[in-house]
């Protein structure tokens, strides 16, 4: 093999045989890892690249720099190009990779297939343009146009594909069910839009992501009798969303909270851009207290997706069609129609989601919703009424967009239950509403999983403190009859 000049580029397939040699590489960025602190004094991130000679899998390049802001920040993984000079080829446990050394290596990042520019938007050290660089950049841009599936996103699934228990699909790489803690964990690949990168506390970050689809309903495993001392949480993370954030979230489709699960390791998640579609690889999805959330791991990789990507266009088209439909605001898992456990006095009023009710610009409002009743307080029907005989019940309602408390009170509850039935009849109605099997006794049914049915109800929002109308806003169920 003839020795290459220092300014020549080596195809990736050839470079993988040049272990312990310095090479120059040029490739399309397939994905990157989150910036983080190395075990020494440097900062580190992983970049995976492909070219015509090595289009499958990609070559990992470990990049080390003195500060985090010098690491590459790839603006679009839908075809952006990186030039890497003087990186060293290494192998570990039969896996070949390249190492970028801050002392003698350099990189330059260029816009991808939709650009005609040959000026880098970021570089490490000084980039001296060479005429042959244009040839290689043009060659990669043309190759990507001729081979659009090289960066295909069709294997990345949606939030609706997350499954509890045994019904796993291609999205799940591994899973763990911890029954004692009521936690389900699965690592998966997904494509979604980053709505918000939020520093909830100093150096603690949370992402809000969304893809327009609904996470499916899951079994409720909490004990009803614990609702007073240990109520089901309304959020999947121990942080309540401020109203200014909540009101700017989509009203339809699940907004998933993504936190860090990296121990003492800090990831530079603030490099992520809002309002950008992103593919995640090895994002951990977990079920806690019957609510989905997700977390980033040290092995999580990501890549940006252009708005023109066919998966993005499909998701947005489906969401737009659903939001314009009179009945499209029903949870996807309730189709073709919710159960007939309840009826309302306003059957022709279109449905809205709980998130739309929460984000309503007026504190007072009326809403027609499809929900599940996941908890009741008090849980014993003998305590549903006060000593004076007035109904006073707090129900926990959920749909794919939110979980809220709503009250059944006085004449609205009387209308709901059909008057004042016996405790046996009331217990049967409660069990039907909460998804409790009739074969379970009171003590036994608190130990079993429940799958509450989708029901229709009318909700009314109102403040109880005129000095704090939003902070004291409550919801009540009205104009609804439990017919079961």
Image (cartoon, rainbow, N blue to C red):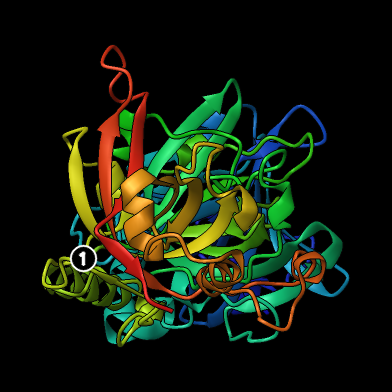
Evaluate whether residue 259 shows in this view: yes
| Picture coordinates of residue 169, whole percent (x, y) | 59, 86
Quadrant of the frame with the N terminus: bottom right
| Neighbourhood count class around disc 1 (C-alpha, 10 Å): few under 14, some 14–19, many 20 upward | many
The residue at the point 61 percent across, 57 percent down is 381
Along the horizontal axis of the image, is 466 left or right of 219?
left
| Picture coordinates of residue 64, whole percent (x, y) | 66, 40
- Vertical relation: 249 (above or below) 465: below
The residue at the point 50 percent across, 47 percent down is 393
| Picture coordinates of residue 122, whole percent (x, y) | 39, 40
Q: Name the residue under label 1.
A: 351
Quarter occupied by residue 41: top right
- Vertical relation: 330 (above or below) 405: below
Evaluate whether residue 125 shows in this view: no
Q: Is mark 1 on a helix, strand or loop?
A: loop
Along the horizontal axis of the image, is 79 left or right of 438?
left
- Vertical relation: 282 (above or below) 33: below
Along the horizontal axis of the image, is 206 left or right of 477?
right
| Picture coordinates of residue 313, whole percent (x, y) | 23, 73
Q: Nearer the viewer, residue 462 or 211?
A: 462
Quadrant of the frame with the C terminus: bottom left
Q: Which of 464 and 15 is in front in this view?
A: 464
- Vertical relation: 208 (above or below) 131: above
Quarter occupied by residue 310: bottom left
Q: Nearer the viewer, residue 19 or 288?
A: 288
Along the horizontal axis of the image, is 66 left or right of 280?
right
Quarter occupied by residue 135: bottom left
Q: How many discs mark residues in the rendered view?
A: 1
């Amino acid at each position: 093999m003839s020795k290459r000049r220092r300014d020549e580029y080596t195809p990736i397939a050839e470079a993988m045989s040049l272990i312990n040699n310095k090479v120059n590489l040029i490739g399309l960025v397939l994905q990157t890892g989150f910036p983080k602190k190395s075990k020494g004094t440097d900062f580190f991130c992983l970049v995976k690249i492909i070219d015509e000679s090595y289009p499958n899998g990609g070559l990992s390049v470990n990049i080390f720099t003195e500060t985090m802001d010098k690491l590459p920040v790839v603006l679009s993984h839908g075809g952006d190009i990186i030039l890497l000079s003087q990186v060293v080829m290494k192998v570990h446990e039969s896996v070949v990779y390249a190492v970028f050394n801050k002392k003698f290596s350099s990189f330059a990042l260029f816009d991808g297939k939709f650009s005609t520019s040959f000026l880098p938007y970021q570089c490490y050290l000084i980039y001296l343009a060479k005429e042959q660089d244009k040839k290689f950049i043009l060659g990669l841009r043309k190759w990507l146009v001729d081979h659009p599936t090289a960066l295909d996103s069709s294997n990345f699934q949606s939030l609706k594909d997350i499954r509890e228990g045994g019904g796993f699909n291609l999205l799940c790489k591994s899973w763990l069910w911890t029954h004692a803690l009521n936690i389900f964990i699965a690592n998966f690949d997904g494509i979604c839009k980053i709505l918000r990168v939020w520093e909830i506390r100093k150096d603690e970050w949370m992402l809000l992501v969304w893809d327009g689809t609904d996470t499916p309903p899951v079994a409720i495993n909490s004990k009803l009798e614990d609702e007073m001392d240990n109520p089901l949480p309304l959020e999947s993370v121990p942080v309540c969303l401020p109203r200014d954030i909540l009101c700017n979230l989509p009203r339809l489709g699940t907004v998933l909270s993504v936190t860090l699960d990296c121990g003492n390791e800090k990831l530079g998640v603030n490099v992520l851009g809002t309002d950008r579609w992103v593919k995640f690889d090895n994002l951990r999805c977990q079920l806690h207290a019957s609510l989905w959330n997700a977390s980033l791991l040290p092995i999580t990789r990501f890549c940006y997706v252009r708005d023109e990507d066919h998966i993005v266009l499909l998701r947005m088209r489906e969401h737009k069609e659903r939001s314009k439909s009179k009945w499209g605001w029903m949870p996807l898992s309730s189709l073709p129609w919710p159960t007939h456990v309840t009826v309302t006095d306003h059957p022709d009023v279109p449905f809205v989601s709980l998130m739309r009710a929460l984000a309503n610009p007026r504190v007072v409002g009326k809403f027609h919703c499809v929900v599940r009743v996941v908890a009741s307080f008090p849980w014993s029907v003998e305590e549903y009424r006060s000593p004076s005989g007035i109904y006073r019940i707090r129900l926990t309602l959920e749909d794919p967009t939110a979980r809220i408390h709503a009250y059944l009170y006085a004449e609205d509850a009387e209308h709901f239950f059909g008057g004042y039935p016996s405790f046996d009849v009331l217990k049967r109605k409660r069990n039907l509403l909460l998804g409790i099997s009739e074969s379970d006794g009171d003590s036994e049914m608190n130990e079993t999983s429940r799958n509450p049915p989708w029901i229709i109800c009318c909700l009314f929002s109102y403040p109880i403190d005129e000095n704090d109308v939003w902070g004291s806003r409550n919801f009540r169920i009205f104009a609804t009859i439990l017919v079961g």
